[in-house]
Amino acid sequence: MSLAVIGVAEVPTKRDPSRTRWDILKDVCVRAIEDAGIGKDDIEAVLSVNPMAQPSMALDMALGRIPEVLGLNGCKDICVMNSGGTSTTNCVRLANAFLSNGWAKFVLIPHTTVQSDIPTEDLINFFATAPLDPQWEYPYGVTFNGAMGLITNRYMYETGTTPEEMASVTVGLRGWAAKDPMSIFYGKPVTLEDVMNSRMISTPLHSKECNFLADGGGAMVVTTHEIAKELGRPAAYELGHDMRFMGATPVLRSDVFSRESYRGSSQGALEKAGLTINDMDLRQIYGAYPYTQCSALEGYGVCEEGEGARLWASGRCGPDGDLPCTTMGDATGRGHTGSGVSMAFYIDTVRQVRGDAGERQVKNCEHAILTTAGGSVMNACTTIFGRSAP
């Protein structure tokens, strides 16, 4: 038995501390349930994405306040997942267990993040320490941007990728974001010159190639393939899934660019779906930094190793390209909402497969491949979604 996403909702990503966490959470949960065409008491489990750097909200979620606040009278159990950017993926995987074991017919998966009311120093310290080894990396002044800058520098050295080619990834991602009303950068495309002239943060990453911390939230309602078919509503059907783990500490990884993990997880997921990478109409890659867009395409087998950035530079992966990738703009185009960036990826994938992605809609999007990563790209979790079930 596999899972189908039948309801989604989200709020625009922006910095606005007047939108409280519970305001966002209640909004997206109510609208996702409405989008699914069911009643609130049909929800039998709530599996939440852990809100990073927000201990009070995390505790509220972990101790079961969501069903109580929303009045979900049919809810049987709750759980909170935390694996950084793959937290949404883990919620989906646990939801599959609830559905396949008959514990629930409908599962709600919510997330909310408000970072704009957290002191800047606290946020910097959190994102400096959370993904890095406290003994071998953090004491030497390495930050998240620093670690990703080092990996990007090595990628460019080994592949011959130029700064302009790498910067073109951000141009493409921001091109998608400019067409997305949910993005903090809606209506704000950038040029290659804009990216190259932005200040250097950690060589070779300019400020526009790094993440912008923001507030956001989203929710999904999932059920079985069979129930989704019975409801007769547009849905995104999970067709295959697989994963690979690289390790928590960047300096200790042999798979430095995550390329082998992208390859293994994507091949496994595609085999389970009975499809090939050439059957995919959309490639959704969450890695938060531009080089991951390149190495994932190489791992998928879309192009040769070292050619990923050149695909973006040619315009093939951005709006109007023939190989559309990451149509929600990744964290550099959407804004980084803690562990919830991947929630936006799932919601965007559902919208693309259902055919309601608006100005960003990929033509005839029957199948999509989605890869998420957690920590400082510690793993690769790949799922294949389709417009119809087998």
Image (cartoon, helix red, strand yellow):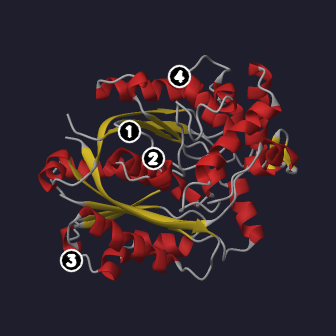
Q: Is residue 267 visible?
A: yes
Label placed on residue 197:
none
Residue identified by numbered label 1:
365
Residue that mark 3 sits on: 73
State if disc 4 and disc 1 touch (CB < 8 Å). no
Residue receiving disc 4: 302
**Amino acid found under the numbered disc labelled 1:** Cys
* Distance Cα–Cα, label 3 vs label 2: 37 Å
Residue type at mark 2: give it.
Gln
**Residue 333 higher or lower than 60, as above or below:** above
Q: Nearer the viewer, mark 2 or mark 4?
A: 2
Crowdedness near tag 4: few (<14), some (14–19) or many (≥20) residues, C-alpha within 10 Å: some
Asked if the residue at tag 4 contacts the one at tag 2, i.e. Cβ–Cβ closer than 8 Å, the answer is no
The CA distance from mark 1 to mark 2 is: 8 Å
**Residue 281 location in percent, x, y?**
42, 33
> Is there CB contact under 8 Å for labels 1 and 2?
yes
- Compare marks 1 and 4 and give the one earlier in the sequence: 4
Which of the pair 95/204 is nearer the observer?
A: 204
The quadrant in which residue 213 appears is bottom right
| Circle 2 Cα neighbour tier, 10 Å, few/some/many (<14 / 14–19 / ≥20) | some
Q: Quadrant of residue 390?
A: top left
Q: CA distance from mark 1 to mark 3?
A: 37 Å
Who comes first in sequence, dot 2 or dot 4?
Answer: 4
Q: Which residue is mark 2?
A: 361
The picture places residue 147, in percent across and down from the top left corner, at 75, 42
The residue depicted at 20 percent of the width and 67 percent of the height is: 38
